[in-house]
Image: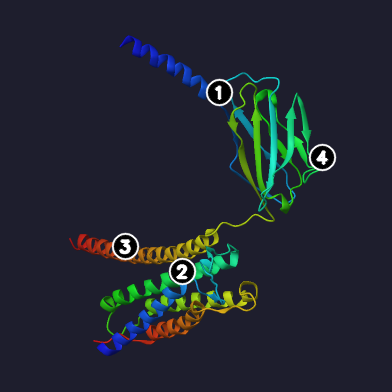
Amino acid sequence: MLLLLLGIIFLHLAALVLLFVSTIVSAWTTGESTTSDLWTNCTTSGCITASTGEWIQSVQAVMILSIIFSCLSLFLFFCQLFTLQKGGRFFLTGTFQILASLFVMSGAIIYTVMSPEWVPEGNSFGYSYILAWVAFPLALISGLIYVILRKRE
Amino acid sequence: MLTFLALTSVALLGIVPEQSQAIAIYTGWERHALVGSDIRLSCSFFSWRWTSEDVTFSWTYRPDGSRDSISIFHYTGGAAYVDNKGPFRDRLEFVGNPGRRDGSILLKNLELNDNGTFTCDAKNPPDIVGRPSSVRLLVFEKVPIQAGVITGAIIGVVLGLLVLIVVIYYLMRFLVARRVFSLSVSKHGKKKKEGSQQRQIKV
């Protein structure tokens, strides 16, 4: 029982850490000497703020929202752990975590769809982009586990 | 002591008018405009002297990335001379009022190449010592969105919806609980009335 609890919390925290790194580090696109998006574009000669187009801002907003919802879900999990009746399901926790995963998914999809404009020829996707795509199934699985799990003891 | 005071006062009287004879020129700091629009670049000055008849205004333009300035406007002897050969020919108009110390010009039909620094220099004889003032012009194709506006809007809307849903949920629970409570109270009330009526009849 304790092992299951620790495993679930570890999965949730892993998804949360991936979300944080993916959002904060500006490395969605990398070239030979440049890294860019979501917040700054850096070359060897210096950094400037990223373009202020509507779609970049929407990706920023959606990633931040996914972090907020994942944190809320973790907080709710601990609340429900102590207040739920025996046999109850962690519905609220699961919904917030699934919403967070949906936000990451939409952010990654928007970035992929706009990539012909944003990722110039010769540049490739950076590790922040890949972490976003990895965080999406982790958060989704974590949310589904919460919805299926029943409180015991 | 008295001579010392007299000397300092004479020195001060001597210094202050010297400084106050500098002319101070005011333009904007930076101006933004859209391609194809008109923009008024204002220039005015402050001088301790009356506005003389020989007041002159001159504007020079230095394109972004270039080190050379080109003269585009000059007002002297009561007449305004606008650019008729340079980058602003037929696009420049004098809209100032030299009598009111205003040497503003109007640029029409802006192009993307008009990005640059415009310097205004005014002279009000005998008040001629002063620093010219510059205004930077930025021409945009379309109005750029400020960074963070849409981000903040999306986050605000979603969190607002969340708060709204929570509030509505608790409100519904509260209302339903109150209706159940009032129903049970009315039931209790009816039972009490019937009970007291029966007792009265018995008595």
Mark 4 vs mark 2: same chain?
no
Q: Chain of mark 1?
A: B
- Circle 3 or circle 2, nearest the eye: 2
Q: Is residue B32 above or below residue B54?
A: below
At label 1, counting other C-alpha atoms closer than 10 Å, the crowd grade (few under 14, some 14-19, many 20 or more) is some
Residue under label 4 = B84
Inspect the image, locate mark 2, and give the three-letter code of the amino acid beneath it.
Ile
Residue B139 pos. (x, y %): 68, 51
Residue under label 1 = B21
- Mark 3 falls on what kind of element? helix
Q: Is residue A75 above or below residue B97?
A: below
Inspect the image, locate mark 1, and give the three-letter code of the amino acid beneath it.
Gln
Q: CA distance from mark 4 to mark 2?
A: 55 Å
- Mark 4 falls on what kind of element? loop
Quadrant for the C terminus of chain A, please: bottom left
Mark 3 vs mark 2: same chain?
no
Inspect the image, locate mark 3, and give the three-letter code of the amino acid beneath it.
Ser
Q: Of the two numbered discs 4 and 3 on the same chain, state the one appearing first in sequence.
A: 4
Residue under label 2 = A64
Residue A33 pos. (x, y %): 55, 74
- Residue shown at 50% from the left, 81% from the top: A130
At label 4, counting other C-alpha atoms closer than 10 Å, the crowd grade (few under 14, some 14-19, many 20 or more) is few
- Residue shown at 23% from the left, 64% from the top: B195
Residue B159 appears anywhere in the view: yes
- Mark 2 falls on what kind of element? helix
Depth order, front residue of B198/A133? A133
Mark 1 vs mark 2: same chain?
no
Q: Chain of mark 4?
A: B
- Circle 1 or circle 3, nearest the eye: 1
Mark 4 vs mark 1: same chain?
yes
